[in-house]
Amino acid sequence: MELLSYPSKQIQIGEFYTTKIIINQDITLFNEDGSLVFCFIKNCIPDNMYDFSDKIVKISKQESVNRGNAAGRVNIEGLQKGKTHWKSYPVELTNASGEPLNGSKSSSFFKYNDGRISKRARSNSVMSSALGGFDKSPHHPCRLTHYTKKILKDYPSIFPLSKHIANIYQSKFPDYYEAQKEVYNDSPVDYIIPNSVFSTITLNHDFRTACHQDKGDCKKGLTCFTIKKCGDYSGGELCFPEFQMGVNVEQGDLLIFNPHVIHCNNALEGEGRMSMVFYIREKMNQCPSV
């Protein structure tokens, strides 16, 4: 089924929204200008494709304090989550100069109990990490991610899933695929995922995202999204609140979407929802060869 729609609601980035209209069947949604919002395909990935290394599942549970808007409005409880090893806990959210914030930001510096100000801003702590390559940032060169290097022998176990997803992507949206393939082909082979059009896989575990747009994703291409079920849970649907609908992506399903459209998740009950987001970084083709 194909639908043509248009944004009908003003959405605040960094806020949590609940979407009641949930899609459970094959559907493609286009914006009013004809651009793709998302394409949902049920039961297109065999279960054996999810038999990658358990170390990859373990990495999806690593805490991150760098997810910005996706982690919601920053707060003390969110900063401390999963960080019980800290010797001094933050007691006040501040800007870089130590002046108090009003709670409207998605990342913050903070003041420790002893009065020191943190050296970098953090967002709420969530279970999220990345495999594959990253392009240059203000603080880091082009590189394989930390966790990729940590499990380099197990990393290839997810390549068959990446290839299968890329093949579906190509069959559904050849124009987007070829534009993304150009960036992929011009990128260093050490930083891309073989036999695909992806450089990076973001892994999330039981992470309810607030409204956000993905930064750093290739603007010419699309993002691919699937789920590995690691426990008993309900909810957590991926939603597009401007269009007032969400998609119930389950293991075996594939969602292909425009990552620059605002998206978020419904609340999750239970545990064990591991999401995998396949994409290529916007500037990966500007990285020097290794």
Image (tube, grey):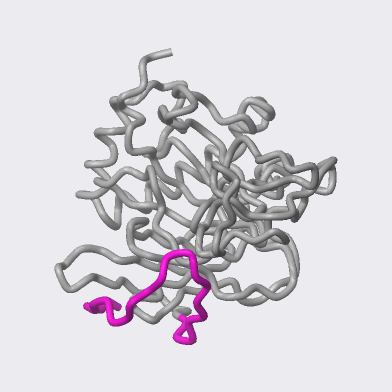
Is residue 160 positioned above or below 170 on the image? above
- Return the residue found at the far left: 33
Give the quadrant of the C terminus: top left
Q: Where is residue 71 drawn, in percent x and y?
A: 57, 59
Q: Where is residue 288 drawn, in percent x and y?
A: 36, 16
Q: Relative to residue 247, is residue 260 drawn left or right?
A: left
Can you see residue 204?
no
Tell me which residue sits at (54%, 50%) in the image.
67
Give the quadrant of the N terminus: bottom left
Is residue 82 positioned above or below 37 on the image? above
User: Quadrant of residue 2 in the image?
Assistant: bottom left
Asked whether 3 falls inside the magenta stretch, the response is yes
* Magenta stretch: dominant secondary structure: loop
Q: Give, as a single range, the part of the protein colored magenta.
A: 1-22
Is residue 208 positioned above or below 204 on the image? below
Q: Nearer the viewer, residue 248 or 81?
A: 81
Can you see residue 167?
yes
Q: Nearer the viewer, residue 14 or 55?
A: 14
Q: Nearer the viewer, residue 160 or 268?
A: 268
Q: Where is residue 18 drawn, in percent x and y?
A: 52, 80
Q: Where is residue 57 drawn, in percent x and y?
A: 70, 47
User: Quadrant of residue 158 in the image?
Assistant: top right
Tell me which residue sits at (43%, 29%) in the image.
138
Q: Nearer the viewer, residue 260 or 272?
A: 260
Tell me which residue sits at (44%, 80%) in the image.
23
- Return the residue found at the far top: 290
User: Quadrant of residue 245 in the image?
Assistant: bottom left
Q: Relative to residue 133, is residue 288 drawn left or right?
A: left
Tell me which residue sits at (39%, 52%) in the image.
223
